[in-house]
Image (cartoon, rainbow, N blue to C red):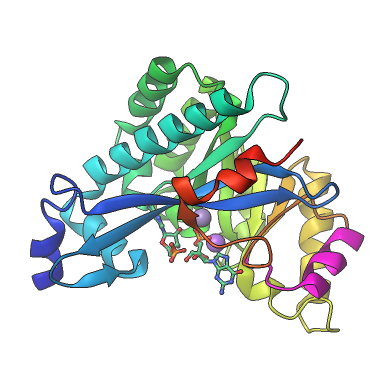
Amino acid sequence: VKLEQALRGALDRGELAVHFQPIVDIVTDELDGFEALMRWNSPELGFVSPVEFIPIAEETGLIEEMGAWMLRESVRQLQEWLDVRGPDARPLHVSVNVAVRQLSDGSLVKLVDDTLRESGLPPRALWLEITESGVMADIEAALLTLNALHALGVTLCIDDFGTGYSSLSYLHRLPVGIVKIDRSFIDDVGAAGANEPIVRAVLAMTHAMGHRVVAEGVETEVQRDWLRAQGCDLVQGWFYGKAERAEDLTSWIERPV
Ligand code: G
Ligand code: G
Ligand code: MN
Ligand code: NA
């Protein structure tokens, strides 16, 4: 109850922030974009992890306005970076997490459409991350939403891939462009780890379906090199950088293309 009370009004009091984690092209090491991650600094509770407050935001319905703010703020920031870099630089994307509850209520599609129109951002530059459990919670409702989002031209991603339980049976029905392999599978790759065959199989399968793959949680050069050798497309993780405030990311933005 304490967390819930503190979370109410957190947005209006300016306690929420967006941090951005680089997502890098594994072949060229160039910046491809960022995942936007919500941060909450509560005056009473200090920093609270999204693992704790996102479920509460979902239960209470607060995720509605928090998610809308996240989307607008992420798109605004990306547009600002694109303006700084100019038209000749490699295009960037921003990847925003979508909560289960946002998938099943009807307002997400209009929110995304309005946000894209207001910003002028090319729709494909907006990635939306959906978890397997989010899709499975109500697959028919999720499919309606995902197909409508796909029709807007945004890029859909399956987040935390491999941690759900029925990935294979529905993956081909979803209009996704990107699969993000959960970091629990990436932990031990390159060190003859037990997950290497799984990651290889996921890469083969998702590539055969025409999706691009992001490996999450890459912390070491050994992991990166192994993933590169296996033909993974994009990487995200502490080896490249943690999620940081926009103003602390200028070296990424200004890096020559
Ligand atoms: O930020 P961290 O890196 O600690 O993220 C923890 C979890 O919280 C991840 O599963 C992430 O997807 C989720 N998360 C972070 N920001 C958001 C957000 O804006 N919306 C939703 N729905 N989940 C988020
Ligand atoms: O579930 P989702 O993939 O949206 O969550 C991203 C989460 O992963 C965030 O909590 C982020 O801080 C965390 N994360 C990102 N890169 C790394 C990494 O290299 N190692 C670890 N341990 N966590 C990471
Ligand atoms: Mn994510
Ligand atoms: Na993940």
* Percent of width and height locating residue 146: 49, 35
Q: Quadrant of residue 118?
A: top left
**Looking at the figure, which quarter contains the N terminus?**
bottom left
- Where's residue 78, x and y in %? 50, 33
Residue at coordinates 86% horizontally, 84% vertically from top-left? 192
**Could you tell me what secondary structure mostly forms the magenta stretch?**
helix
Q: x, y (%) of residue 187? A: 68, 78
- The span shown in magenta is 217-230
| Quarter of the C terminus within the rendering | top right
In magenta stretch: residue 30: no
Quadrant of res 119: top left
Q: Position of residue 126 (x, y in %)?
A: 53, 33
The reply, left or right, for residue 241 in relation to residue 243 is right
Residue depicted at x 18% and y 72%: 45
Q: Quadrant of residue 66?
A: top left
Residue occupying the point 8% across, 63% down: 5
Left or right, 104 with reference to 116:
left
